[in-house]
Amino acid sequence: MSRALRTSLLCACAVIAACDDTPDVAPTPGTPAPSESPRDEQDIARRDIHDAFKLAQRATKHASDGGGRAWVESLDGAPLAVTAGTTGRWRIVYEAGELGVARGGAVYFQVSPFFEWSTPQVEAPDAAGFTRIATEAEGVELSAKTLDQQLLGIELGGRELRAGERITIDYGCGPAGARVDPYAEPNSRFWIAVDGDGDGVRKVLADSPGIDVLPGPPAMLVATLTSSARAGEEVRLTLALLDARANAAGACAATLELTGAASELELPSSVVLGADDRGRKTLVGRAPADGVYRVQARAVLAERTLVADSNPLSVGPGPRVFWADFHGHTAVSDGSGTANDYFDFARNVAALDIAALTDHDHWGMLFVDEQPELWRAQVDSARRAHEPGRFVALPGYEWTSWLTGHRHVLYFGEQAPLFSSMDERYESPEQLRETLRDQHALIVPHHPAGGPIAIDWRHAPDPELEPVVEMCSAHGTSEALDCARVIHSPRPGHFARDALARGYRLGFVGSGDGHDGHPGLAWKGPHYPTGGLAAILADELTSDGVYRALRARRCYATSGPRILLRFALGRARMGEAIPAAEVNREGNLYLQVVGASALERIEVVVGASELLSIPCRNELEFSASATLSDLKPGEFVYVRVLQLDGGMAWSSPVFVE
């Protein structure tokens, strides 16, 4: 391998494969095993990744780097668009720009390194991803080699590639074709990068070509009902058809039949789904008298019948429950789809009340902090999707620090600036907080116990700006080691419960951290061990109402299912504090749970280690009260709910002072 290829791989994008932020059941190649963690329990910094990005930032790009254009053609008559999770074959044509590509320079071809595209390779014609490289430019010699995950380097020898001369890249041209991303999205990119002068620094073509990845046939039905209402109020039931990978199925014909409490809720017994409905339909009914209601749905298609049970609706005087996914990604960083697709799915497929889009500031094929127009487009998409009283869409981003852990920033006001973790002015949590203090924003530490990187809790969270922590996401759970489905590569001392034991007052939220374009339903797909949702107990469905609820820790977390949970300790509700003398004198604990499916048990966590288990005997609804005593200042109490199907929920704690 030449110096050009070797150095360019180091300086540009190699770190993408070094520690992939995309959740997988199996570790991503290049992700360090737990045994490779630093010896100091609190030292979680991945300085290798941070330093590689800093090196790339300082690299000087030649005018010929990133020059030229590229497009996709059909190979052997194969369609350009393809169904997610299948195979295909394509010809990508690169044409040199005005400055050409020097002898010793290189052209790079990369499919998304975050998912399951076949790595392009030139060694095994019968294997998936086989790629043939050619040029008609006489005297130009091409040497191709797979350099890393989904990355092929093509070095130029003989002479330079002159303006207008072309290289053809036949991807998937062997009998096995090339495996396609399992997530549907428009314009899934075939990234082309160019090191024009051969100095080892390359630049990606921002307009690299792509193809449409289409959803498969309907394989599951999701029925989502409003979770809380007063008697006489309108309620909504959203019905959505998904393929086997939880992609929105798109245009299809089906008859939807409703039973259970449908008639009581004034919902129709059946409705026809046409091509214009794009595989989803929202129906409006009305809540009758106080009680708990559930709807059963059946989708009758030409080839199969799909069934689904809705989540519970609680009608009565209790708190309003709104559902949020505060953390997710699109193809702008390391996810799938567009921002418009993201918010459309959140509102019209997953039936969320609140969604935030939090692409990385400095991670992916194009860095948002280096492309201001990308950030403006993300913010504009959130503004367009926002409809107070119906759907709250929040702009945000993931502050991707490889030194102290990842956090996402959520904006609730008019201003939404981006402060990059790679900017020395904002590279510590303290600097970020001071910058955001007047921005009507909140910060949420996520996957705190491990996964891509843990949270360094030596940087104490600011109660004004950092009132909650993400308890569960597609990476797994970060509550404690005694919880099910613990996050991969866990680091003892970094769990949410460890932060509480340090004396930090943090409420709990769940969020998907989905990279599949499925906010609110990442847990439905086959690729993630868990998902995450936040239940927001707010007075109104507005940006400010959500902001005030989070600041007060009036929220709780689930792993995806819409479990209804109420919890109090004496007069203190979840997220509040109560004096030890008062709770020990009058300390009645009260809890009420309405499961999305049958409950297995409820566990009461007292302090850093004590756990009281209450069996639920497969009930759908459960309530209990108990008396706790001998609680000490500095302790905390919260509830963990477990369903038989593995679904979980966690109340925000009550803090003893």
Image (cartoon, rainbow, N blue to C red):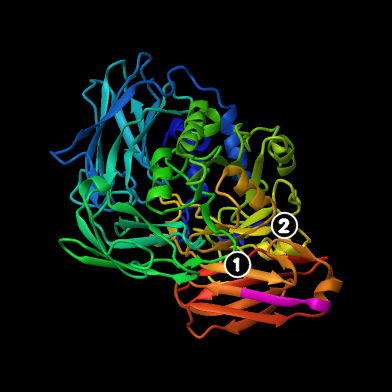
Task: Using the image as rendered, state which of residue 431 and residue 109 is in the foreground.
Answer: 431
Q: Which residue is mark 2?
A: 42
Q: Secondary structure at mark 2?
A: loop
Q: Residue furthest top?
A: 98
| Residue drawn at point x = 45 percent, y = 30 percent | 4
Q: CA distance from mark 2 to mark 1?
A: 25 Å
Q: Position of residue 646 (x, y in %)?
A: 48, 73
Q: Secondary structure at mark 1?
A: strand
| Residue drawn at point x = 71 percent, y = 64 percent | 498
**Residue 29 in the figure: left or right of residue 417:** left
Whether residue 590 appears in magenta in the rendering, the answer is yes
Looking at the rendering, which quadrant does residue 151 occupy?
Answer: top left
Whether residue 420 appears in magenta in the rendering, the answer is no
Q: Quadrant of the N terminus?
A: top left
For the record, the magenta segment spans 585-591
Residue 141 vertical position relative to residue 80 in the rendered view, above or below: above
Sequence order check: which comes first, mark 2 or mark 1? Answer: 2
| Residue drawn at point x = 62 percent, y = 39 percent | 51
Q: Find out whether the residues at labels 2 and 1 contact each other: C-beta distance under 8 Å.
A: no
Q: Residue furthest left?
A: 77
Residue 75 vertical position relative to residue 162 in the rendered view, above or below: below
Q: Which numbered disc covers residue 487?
A: none
Q: In front of the other: label 2 or label 1?
A: 1
| Residue drawn at point x = 70 percent, y = 54 percent | 552
Label 2 neighbour load within 10 Å: few <14, some 14-19, many 20+: some
Task: Using the image as rendered, state which of residue 644 and residue 542 is in the foreground.
Answer: 542
Q: Which residue is mark 1?
A: 650
Q: Amino acid at mark 1?
A: Trp
Q: Amino acid at mark 2?
A: Gln
